[in-house]
């Protein structure tokens, strides 16, 4: 007689399978009743990155107790721009290569162009940066760069109203030589250094760009309510890799729209749509240290509907401001000059 010794095990396996099947069905029904669903483990496990701790130095002075600077005429010389199509002017910087020439530009949604003018508002031409776009150009500066003895233009593609961009960009190119050229001039710049920067504490909006003429460091100041966080990208800035900005100073300044460092590196201007702060630095003091010292109020005539740009004259005789007028029908785009006494 042949014994079937596998039968008990087959019977046992069938019971186990039935039991497992019942368990699975009951478990599924239970999950559906509770509103849950079964998902792969990788989709239910959330890995939270550690919080980024960024430390800014803060000044000790009371921003409500600033003195008024007596160095500049409080009544500016103001002229309309001769070009009537420049409605969103957002920055101004004085050329070091061509005396009296000013660089201005529009912000987001406009052509990738820099416009040339002077204190009278005359049309001196335009420069197109053919290899980059204008996502949101918010400020412009002039200063030294990689080649000794050359002056460079820096364009800050740093606007980010919704704080959504992972990186911001600075576009750098040598100032064009306009010697012997008939103005207005139309120029195309095909070689532009692209400096990609990232904030250490997440995206933020900014409209303020400065270049230190002594160290070639690049400074950006955020535009926030009652606060302006200042970051730096130390020289040399990479044009092949992303540079993480370093925190410097947190100022109690409301909605910064523009700034500049004087050609000799001893003065700083920071503006909003309502006021201007001015620093005169002691000899050999760095920009980072200088921003911790107490500023003064510099003159501002409150004559601009949406004042955004500010820049020192190249010869140190004063400073310029300009304004956006897109949302102010009937207003003209202007250049104002505050002469040093």
Image: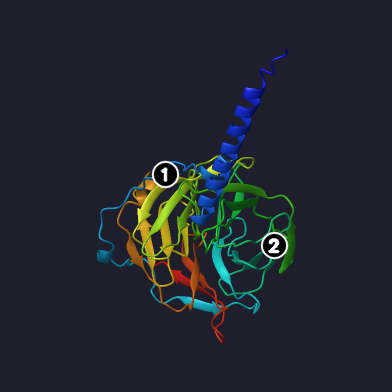
Q: Nearer the viewer, residue 125 or 23?
A: 23
Residue 57, given in percent of the width and then of the height, sits at: 33, 48
**Mark nearer the N terminus (2 vs 1):** 1
Left or right: residue 329 versus residue 175 is: left
Residue 51 is labelled as 1
Q: Which colour style is shown?
A: rainbow
Quadrant in which the C terminus appears: bottom left
Q: Which residue is mark 2?
A: 127
Callouts 2 and 1 close, C-beta under 8 Å: no
From the viewer's side, name the closer residue of 19 and 194. Answer: 19
Q: Which residue is the extreme one toward the front?
A: 1
Q: Which residue sits at x=58%, y=45%? A: 145
Whether residue 176 sits left or right of residue 206 in the image: it is: right
x and y, in percent, of residue 70 in the image: 32, 67
Q: Residues within 10 Å of mark 2 (few under 14, many from 20)?
A: some
Residue 115 rendering spot, x and y as whole percentages: 65, 67
Quadrant (top left/top right/bottom left/bottom right) for the N terminus:
top right
Q: Which mark is residue 161?
A: none
**Residue found at x 55% / y 65%:** 91
Q: CA distance from mark 2 to mark 1?
A: 43 Å
Q: Is residue 154 above or below residue 335?
A: above
Q: Going 29% across and 62% down the picture, which residue do you hit?
A: 63
Q: Quadrant of residue 76?
A: bottom left
Q: Position of residue 307 (x, y in %)?
A: 48, 72
Q: Secondary structure at mark 1?
A: loop
Task: Decide if residue 108 is in sight here.
Answer: yes
Label 2 sits on a secondary structure element that is strand
Residue at x-position 66% and y-position 17%: 5
């Amino acid at each position: 007689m042949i014994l079937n010794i596998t039968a008990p095990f087959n019977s046992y396996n069938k019971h186990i399978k039935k039991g497992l099947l019942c368990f699975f069905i009951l478990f599924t029904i239970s999950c559906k009743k509770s509103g849950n669903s079964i998902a792969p483990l990788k989709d239910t496990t959330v890995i939270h990155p550690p919080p980024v701790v960024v430390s800014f130095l803060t000044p000790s002075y009371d921003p409500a107790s600033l003195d008024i600077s007596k160095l500049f005429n409080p009544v500016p010389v103001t002229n309309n721009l001769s070009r009537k199509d420049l409605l969103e002017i957002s920055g101004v910087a004085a050329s070091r290569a061509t005396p009296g020439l000013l660089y201005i530009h529009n912000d987001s949604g406009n052509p990738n162009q820099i416009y040339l003018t002077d204190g009278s508002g005359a049309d001196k031409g335009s420069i197109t940066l053919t290899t980059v776009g204008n996502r949101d150009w918010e400020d412009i500066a002039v200063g030294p760069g990689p080649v000794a003895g050359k002056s460079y233009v820096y364009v800050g593609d740093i606007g980010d109203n919704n704080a959504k961009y992972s990186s911001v960009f600075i576009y750098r190119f040598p100032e064009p030589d306009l010697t012997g050229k008939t103005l207005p001039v139309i120029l195309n710049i095909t070689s532009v250094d692209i400096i990609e920067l990232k904030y250490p504490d997440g995206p933020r909006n900014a409209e303020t760009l400065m270049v230190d003429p002594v160290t070639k460091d690049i400074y950006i100041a955020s535009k926030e309510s009652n606060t302006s966080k200042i970051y730096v990208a130390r020289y040399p800035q990479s044009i092949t890799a992303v540079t993480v900005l370093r925190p410097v100073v947190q100022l109690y300044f409301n909605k910064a729209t523009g700034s500049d460092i004087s050609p000799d590196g001893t003065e700083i201007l920071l503006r909003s749509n309502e006021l201007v702060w001015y620093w005169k630095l002691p000899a050999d003091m760095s920009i980072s240290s200088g921003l911790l010292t107490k500023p003064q109020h510099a003159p501002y005539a409150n004559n601009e509907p949406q004042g955004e740009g500010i820049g020192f004259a190249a010869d140190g005789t004063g400073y310029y401001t300009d304004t956006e007028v897109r949302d102010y029908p009937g207003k003209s785009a202007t250049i104002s000059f505050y002469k040093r006494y």
